[in-house]
Image (spheres, rainbow, N blue to C red):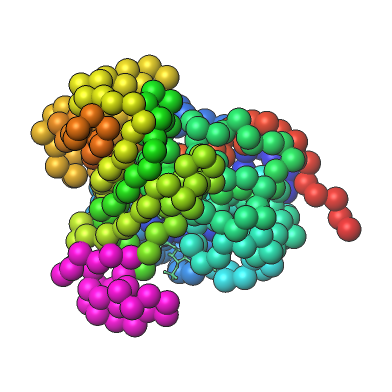
Amino acid sequence: MSRNTSKHRIAINGYGRIGQSVLRALYTSPQHHSDLQVVAINELSDIDTLTYLTRYDTTHGRFPVAVQNDGSHMLVNGDRIRTLNEELPEHLPWKELDIDLVLECTGTYTDRATAERHLASGARRLLFSQPADADIDATIVHGFNSGQLQPQHQIVSSASCTTNCIVPVLDLLDRRFGIENGVSTTIHSAMNDQPVIDSYHHTDLRLTRSALQSMVPVETGLSQGIGKMMPHLRGRIECLHLRVPTINVSLMDLALNLRKPTDPQSVNAIFRQAAEGPLQGLLGYTEEPHASIDFNTDPRSAIVDGTQTRVSAGKLIKLMVWFDNEWSYANRMLDVAQAWLELGGTDSPPEES
Ligand SMILES: NC(=O)c1ccc[n+]([C@@H]2O[C@H](COP(=O)([O-])OP(=O)(O)OC[C@H]3O[C@@H](n4cnc5c(N)ncnc54)[C@H](OP(=O)(O)O)[C@@H]3O)[C@@H](O)[C@H]2O)c1
């Protein structure tokens, strides 16, 4: 297939909450990612359902862009997006479609070997929408370690939404006060791995329980995610995770022991200055009396709620940090994709073997 634009050609594999948010974010904030074009979507559903779910969304509202289909392509604002219905990566026509980058949003695997099956199908790079195994090329929290991206990287992860939220917050506090240790609880909206009414789940008994009726503690890899980004904090931040019956927006509840004493005003000043300065667009700071829905469709990774900052005896601090677990993460995936593709390095399709 010959290229008719200079844009990087993206495929979305798995068109669920994150896959759909990525497409919506690309069209509604095009100034940030104007070099990226989605040319294919693979999902285990029919094109009419994909079209419908793109037009209407209970969480983020009606898509403000015309969406139709011609039976094989979804037409978004006039752009043709090939839709595919293949379970196995080796059946995907990434070579024919000249795919620069697959956004892997199925959530079904985290290993390099499966990711490489997309490369064998002709894609040049793959970006996981979740933490992946240790042998991938890099794990990137945009705005924290994007400088580690290399042109020769082929398989990268954009970490988790919780890692993207907590790392910039920890980093600011660690630089100013030094972090001794801490505990976090993510109060997270429901996800599609939970049933509406009690049902079977293969790996986690708690995920058999209705998402509508209970607060449900689930496992989290956030502590390991922090350790990967900030090795000196490895094993020093313990993390819990609770799913609650809302459909979007989450809250990070963070308690930290600091090395140097402080007070709430000094802690908040650090976040306010960072939000207005170097981390503008990624970190927010607010003193408004907010509820979670106020952050729906907010692209920032973390919004510190200054009204909730507490300091006990100088060194024990408590913070509450909001984030839209879907929209912020979809925007970070696009940020990582753009930064990575701008490095060049794999512009030509792989040679035939
Ligand atoms: N939702 C969030 O807030 C969030 C935030 C950050 C990261 N993530 C991560 O992103 C990943 C996806 O999460 P999600 O919330 O978007 O899940 P989701 O809504 O369940 O979406 C995943 C989609 O992938 C499809 N799929 C499964 N296997 C496939 C295959 N072999 N080929 C093509 N499509 C396939 C699923 O179809 P079926 O339903 O038919 O199986 C589903 O529509 C997970 O790893 C999650 O941890 C999620």
Please state the extent of the stretch shown in magenta in the rendering.
Answer: 194-218
Q: Residue at x 65, y 52 (%)?
A: 136
Q: Residue at x 43, y 25 (%)?
A: 175
Q: Residue at x 39, y 38 (%)?
A: 180
> Does residue 166 show up?
yes
Q: Residue 353: give x, y in percent of width and height.
A: 89, 58
> Does residue 76 show up?
no
Residue 101 is covered by the magenta coloring: no
Front in this rendered view, residue 66 or 180: 180
Q: Is residue 157 above or below residue 285?
A: below
Front in this rendered view, residue 46 or 343: 343
Using the rendered view, name the quadrant where residue 2 is placed. Answer: top right
Using the rendered view, name the quadrant where residue 148 is placed. Answer: top right
Q: Residue 15: give x, y in percent of width and height.
A: 45, 58
* Position of residue 198 in the picture relative to residue 70 (left or right): left
Residue furthest to the right in view is 353
Dominant secondary structure, magenta: loop
Residue furthest to the bottom in view is 200
Q: Is residue 146 above or below residue 117?
A: above
Front in this rendered view, residue 68 or 227: 227
Q: Residue 73: give x, y in percent of width and height.
A: 52, 56
Q: Is residue 15 above or below residue 22?
A: below
Ligand 1 position by quadrant: bottom left
Residue 211 is covered by the magenta coloring: yes
* Position of residue 158 in the picture relative to residue 7 (left or right): left
Q: Residue 229: give x, y in percent of width and height.
A: 52, 41
Q: How many marks?
A: 0
Q: Residue at x 57, y 33 (%)?
A: 146
